[in-house]
Image (cartoon, grey):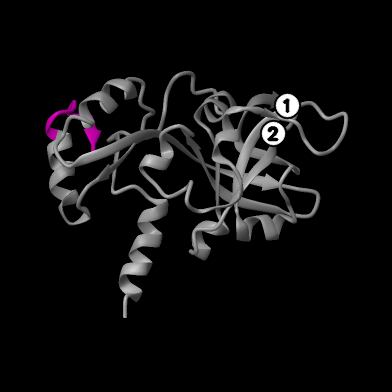
Amino acid sequence: TGFKEDLRDKILGTNSHIVVTDRTQDNIKDYREILRKVLKVPHVVAATPFIYRQVLLSSENNVHGVVLRGIDPATEGTVTDIRKNMFEGSIDNLSKQVDSKDEGVTPTPGIIIGRELAGRLGAFLGDRINVISPVGNTMGPMGIVPKIRHFTVVGIFDSGMYEYDSSLAYVSIKSAQDFFNLGDEVTGVEVKVDDIFIADQVAHEIEKGLDIRYWA
């Protein structure tokens, strides 16, 4: 009845076909060189870097744990369906410092959250929410203090998959690098191929062209 294809398309609309990461789970410094090599592999149609971290989001109404993904707004839409899934707002606003709808508030980086997550947090377009990293970098009298930064909701997406819409948020790669003190490093590279049924073969070809420390 098409249910299998619909479910598959929704999952692959949020996740890439192939992911390239460091085998030791370290961050990747030479990701631009990896992108250059990956894009030359046959059947690869697009690739983009990403950052992946677990954080807490808090609003005036609630607190919720989510996966925060740092993305390149210019190229993420070539690998996933984030642009097509936008319910409100625009992915392009992730690259800007955004004015909150509250007057007198300093502009903040943008964040995109799922429709279900927005309902849980009671957050709407233009609202300011807090991103809290449990891994802080400041020592207080009780130990390491969690890092907190304000973001403004610039978009709400609806993928049609509750698991994603309730537990996923996006910021720009630059915002994620600044927040997590990563410098010019990323978690990995997302890859899209022209035929999902040969993704494992393409992944093998990608690995052959990269350093042994990388896994596709």
Residue corresponding to mark 2? 148
Say if residue 44 shows up in the picture.
yes
Residue 135 locus on image (x, y percent): 58, 34
* Residue 143 part of the magenta-drawn span: no
In the orientation shown, which residue stands out farthest toward the right?
Answer: 104
* Residue 214 part of the magenta-drawn span: yes
Residue 143 locus on image (x, y percent): 68, 30
Real-space CA distance between mark 1 and mark 2, rounded to the nearest whole angstrom: 14 Å
Identify the secondary structure beneath mark 1. strand
Identify the secondary structure beneath mark 2. strand
Query: Which amino acid, by three-letter code, is at mark 2?
Result: Ile
Q: Main secondary structure of the magenta part?
A: loop
Task: Please give the name of the residue rendered at 24% of the width and 32% of the height, measured from the top-left corner.
Answer: 214
Q: Which residues are magenta?
A: 208-216
The quadrant where residue 192 appears = top left
Residue corresponding to mark 1? 140
Task: Please give the name of the residue rendered at 32% of the width and 22% of the height, measured from the top-left corner.
Answer: 32
The quadrant where residue 23 appears = top left
